[in-house]
Image (tube, rainbow, N blue to C red):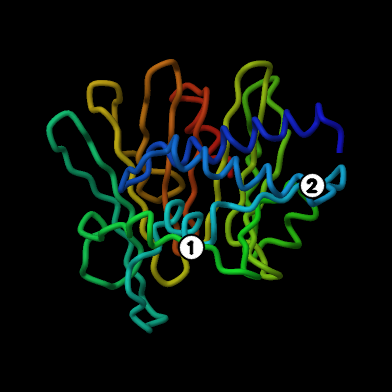
Amino acid sequence: MGDKYRHVLDQIIEETVKEEYDHILPITSTNEAWENFNKRREHKYKSRTFSPRKKKFVMLGTSLAVCIILISLLPQSGSSFASLTEIFGKVEGNMISLFVKVGENEEHIEDVKEPSLDEYYVIEGSETTMDEIDLEQAKKETAFPILIPKWVPTDFELEHVLVLTKQNQKSDEIYLQYKSNAKHFTIRQTSTGHEFGLGMSYNKDEVNVEQIKINGYQANLINRSKGISKLFWVTQSIYYSIDGHLTKEEIIQIAESM
């Protein structure tokens, strides 16, 4: 893999993953976590070779990657029927927090405590990796049907398809990144399983939050500064989000075309 390709892909991976980390609750030191991640990744570079079409990243250990991205800390109920979906928010001081919860457990996601950094550890042989593959291969390696938007703004093209995998299992999380010159947006699709929780927090003076409907599902639209928008919703089994340099009209049209 050429140094130029590696550098570009590093930037894309960092933008995509760090964007998710920056607004996920509970919030820890993102810079510290990313610095540790880069140290681990550089160590892997010294001992591995990479193919031109595929790149693996060890994600700060299985617990850090899965817990921070998905916050899968809710106890398993053992039930496979009638999972409930809640999207709710609260305001505390200057912060507005939004939460997504799928499952029957009565415990609210905001009451779940994040483990300390001392509790994060790497399980040998069970690394979570992020791979870049082409779309057709992703369709075969993802555990659910991938939704592709039928409409995107002019000049935007699909540049990167990233899947998060663990060992030899099919991926339950995929990122589609579209780019146009200096602008980009990312579509994330994640299987919720029987129980799933996610939280994000913003300064309420810097965002405007609206509740809308996307193809019959409740969705939250977050308009942030610098023309960046985020839209997320949950179906019976999949969490979807679109995040990037898009207007309100554009992000809604993309979602409704999926």
The residue carrying pointer 1 sits among few (fewer than 14), some (14 to 19) or many (20 or more) residues within 10 Å by Cα, namely few
Q: Quadrant of residue 176?
A: top right
Q: Is residue 136 above or below residue 112?
A: above
Quadrant that contains the N terminus:
top right
Residue 134 numbered tag: 2
Question: In the image, which is nearer the foreground, mark 1 or mark 2?
Answer: 1
Residue picked out by circle 1: 121
Q: Say which of 248 and 89 sits in front.
A: 89
Q: Residue furthest bottom?
A: 78
Identify the residue at horizontal 61%, vertical 48% (top origin).
40
Give the residue displayed 54% in from the left and 41% down from the top. Answer: 17
Task: Pick whichever, 236 or 60, lies toward us.
Answer: 60
- Reading the chain from its start, which is encountered first: label 1 or label 2? 1
Question: Is 214 left, or right, of 107 in this rendering?
Answer: right
Residue 51 is left or right of residue 78, and the answer is: right
Residue at 23 percent of width and 27 percent of height: 204
Asked if marks 1 and 2 touch (Cβ < 8 Å), the reply is no
What x and y, as percent, mark residue 222?
36, 31
Q: Nearer the viewer, residue 57 or 121?
A: 121
Q: Quadrant of the C terminus?
A: top right
